[in-house]
Each structure stands twice: as C-alpha cells, then as structure tokens.
C-alpha cells in the first residue's frame, strides 16, 4: 500500500492527482491479480488474501481521491439554470405532473410579485401523491425554508449546509438575482459521474 502511494506521488509530477491515483490503482490491481495466481499455484492462502486486500483497497483509495476532488468543485460548474418557476398560486397537480416527468424533483416557490418565499421538497410532493391530498394550490403544502448559495462556494460546503439544515434545494444567487438552483439530486448525479 505504501508502494502505491509512492508510485502515485511520482506519477503526480506528470499528471493530475486523480489520474495518477487511477494509474496506480490499475498497476496495484494487476500486481494483486499476479499474487492471486501465484497463491493458487503455490497453495499460499496468505498471499492470496494479500492480493484480495490490495485489489479492494486500491479501488477504495481511488474512489476517496475522486470524491475529495469532486467535493472541491465550485457551484458555478454544476448548478442548473433551467428550472420551473413555481408560484404559490399554481395548482398542485401542475407540480405533480412536472415531478412525474422526472427532470425536477425539488422546487423553489415564488409569490405573485416574483419574490422567492419558500421551497417545495420532493418529500412533500411524494406525501401529497401517497395520501392523495386534495390540495388546490402550492401555498397549501410548501416549506418556508429558503437557502441561498453563491456560485463561488464549494460543493462540500453547500452539501454540509444542506445536510445540517435538512434543505433539499438551494437558490443560486448572484448580484441579488436568482440565476439557478442546486438540489440533492443534482449533487448525487454529479458525484456519480
């Protein structure tokens, strides 16, 4: 394992850290496969277990480095500028129809004067669908919780804030103007890529 870290450090002189970790991981996996083959040939169980351990741990190290790199991404690179402008007077069925289409799962809610006054998290919409609530307007089932973020913040900071405060969607604000949104689904999708 230490040899893999030394190899990654040497590779980092010529390539970016995540890429260097990926190359080191594949070299470690090839060597661990050799350990497994040799352990079957010599009937050495310990060597085989070391091979399995190196194989698994090299993959975990790569995933850790990749996630750390992605978490330092600026919001400006991942927020959505395309979002539905939901108003308190909109019919709840309208929101459910948009939700069922699959693109958007959480929404920010504006009043008639175009002022942001709350949010409509996915859990509220699921509850309305499940309980077949006879809701007429968005104002009947929405959260007054609003979270504003800036484009220069990192994904790690925003994700921590969302988790601590139970927030499903944030409004991205620049120069006192809402220019987009970022929700939990956007973060999950970005982290999986």
Image (cartoon, grey):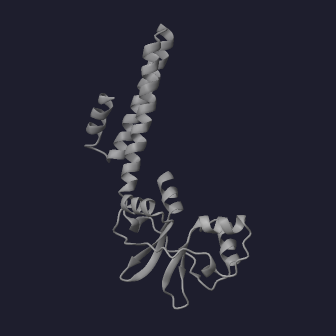
* Residue drawn at the location 37% of the way across and 72% of the way down: 150
- The total of numbered circles placed on residues is 0
Q: Is residue 193 visible?
A: no
Against 128, residue 67 (above or below) is above
Residue 171 place in picture, x, y as percent:
46, 74
Could you say which quadrant of the image residue 152 lies in? bottom left
* Vertical side of 57 occupied by 36: above or below: above
Q: Residue 3 vs residue 129: left or right? A: left
Query: Which part of the image, by quadrant, shows the N terminus?
Result: top left
Q: Is residue 7 left or right of residue 183?
A: left
- Viewer-nearest residue: 184 or 8: 184
Judging depth in this view, the residue of 94 and 143 nearest the camera is: 143
* Residue 21 x/y as whole percent: 36, 40
Residue 159: give x, y in percent of width and height.
42, 60
Give coordinates of residue 24: x percent, y percent: 36, 35
In the orientation shown, which residue stands out farthest toward the bottom?
A: 113
Residue positioned 36% across, 63% down in the render: 74
Q: Is residue 92 visible?
A: yes
**Pick the front one: 164 or 91:** 164
């Amino acid at each position: 394992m230490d040899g893999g870290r030394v190899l990654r450090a040497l590779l980092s002189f010529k390539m970016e850290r995540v890429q260097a970790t990926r190359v080191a991981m594949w070299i470690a996996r090839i060597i661990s496969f050799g350990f497994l083959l040799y352990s079957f040939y010599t009937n050495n169980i310990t060597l085989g277990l070391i091979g399995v351990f190196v194989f698994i741990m090299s993959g975990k190290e790569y995933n850790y480095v990749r996630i750390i790199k992605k978490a330092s991404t600026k919001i400006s690179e991942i927020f959505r500028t395309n979002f539905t402008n939901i108003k308190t007077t909109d019919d709840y069925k309208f929101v459910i129809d948009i939700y069922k289409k699959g693109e958007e799962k959480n929404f920010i809610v504006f009043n008639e004067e175009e002022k942001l006054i709350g949010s409509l998290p996915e859990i509220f919409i699921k509850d309305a669908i499940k309980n077949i609530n006879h809701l007429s307007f968005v104002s009947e089932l929405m959260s007054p919780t609003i979270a504003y973020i800036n484009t220069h913040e990192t994904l790690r900071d925003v994700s921590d804030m969302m988790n601590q405060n139970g927030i499903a969607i944030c409004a991205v604000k620049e120069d006192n103007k809402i220019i987009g949104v970022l929700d939990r689904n956007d973060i999950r999708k970005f982290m999986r890529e």
